[in-house]
Amino acid sequence: MAEPEINAFLTHLAVKEKVSASTQNQALSALLFLYRHVLGREVGDLGDVIRARRPHHLPVVMTREEVKSVLACLPGDKWLMASLMYGAGLRLMPACRLSACIAQAGACGAGGECLRLRIQDIDFARNEILVRDGKGAKDRVTMPPESLKATLQEHLRVVKAVHEQDLGDGWGRVQMPHALDRKYPGAPAEWRWQWVFPQENRWRNASTREEGRHHVDESLVQRAVKDAARRAGILKRATCHTFRHSFATHVLEAGYDIRTVQELLGHQDVRTTMIYTHVLNRGGKGVRSPADTL
């Protein structure tokens, strides 16, 4: 079996099974991997495959009161992470590049968004958060909320004390992006390279007996936000990414122009940002009904 059968199978998934576009793409990726890396054969032209349509959904957005109620149900550092995602428009994690994870045994040390912030990425003097290597491998600058500065600085004092204790125990080295530890051997132990949100417990390499801390696992934050939304009585499907959608919508509501919001979110195309105008009913369907004037 080769190209014609792959075409028929992918078309069958879209037409008969009515799978989503992402499921069909996953099946195609799996087949390409099988042929290239297991069977050792390159796949040629697949012809006209009927592709599953990707639906266009409006993002789920919480009101300010809903955001406040969800945050009130989050404990400690989870509250701080969620507040940063809402207050600075951060993603929980960037879209991970598979090659980077494979190269680093599944623990990518590159830059990123909320969970992969490093100490040096937060500049209180300039009121900036530098998001390194975000989605699309792009850097961008956003701002930390004024209301979080004191809490964030206190959090960093606690993290620094933990880091100094790790150094005293003979560890305290963090994973570096792009193999920088080979170029700068002392950098992994420097304070500026440490994670803003490190793990509570040190991990141990079973083969080398080395100990260290990675950033907080994303599943812990996702689960905490889901539980907080349930306890707050939010019926919407509120996730970590909902805080980012809510940030964009509320900034537009405050009267800031769409180009500013595009820059803060890191969107390459302003059309991606324009979806929030529809959430605000300021887009093509933002017309006031004549019945409301009777």
Image (cartoon, rainbow, N blue to C red):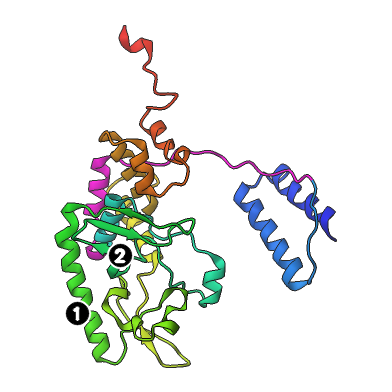
Secondary element at image label 2:
helix
Q: Quadrant of the C terminus?
A: top left
Against 171, residue 138 (above or below) is above
Residue of label 1: 161
Q: Can residue 289 be seen?
A: yes
Q: Can residue 242 be seen?
A: no
* Residue drawn at point x = 41 percent, y = 61 percent: 93
Say which label, 1 or 2, has the lower sequence index. Answer: 2
Viewer-closest of 234 and 91? 91
- Which class describes the residues within 10 Å of circle 1: few (<14), some (14-19), or many (20+)? few
x and y percentages locating residue 177 in the rendered image:
43, 73
Secondary element at image label 1:
helix
Distance between the Cα atoms at labels 1 and 2? 19 Å
Viewer-closest of 43 and 216? 43
x and y percentages locating residue 27 in the rendered image:
68, 57
Q: Is residue 92 left or right of residue 102?
A: left
State which region is magenta.
Answer: 48-77
- Where residue 174 sits, quadrant-wise, is bottom left
- Which class describes the residues within 10 Å of circle 2: few (<14), some (14-19), or many (20+)? some
Chief secondary structure of the magenta portion = loop
- Where residue 150 sits, quadrant-wise, is bottom left
Q: Quadrant of the N terminus?
A: bottom right
x and y percentages locating residue 229 in the rendered image:
32, 51
Q: Is residue 57 magenta?
A: yes
Q: Is residue 217 left or right of residue 97?
A: left
* Residue drawn at point x = 21 percent, y = 70 percent: 156
Q: Which mark is residue 121?
A: 2
Q: Is residue 264 left or right of residue 76?
A: right
Name the amino acid type tagged 2. Asp
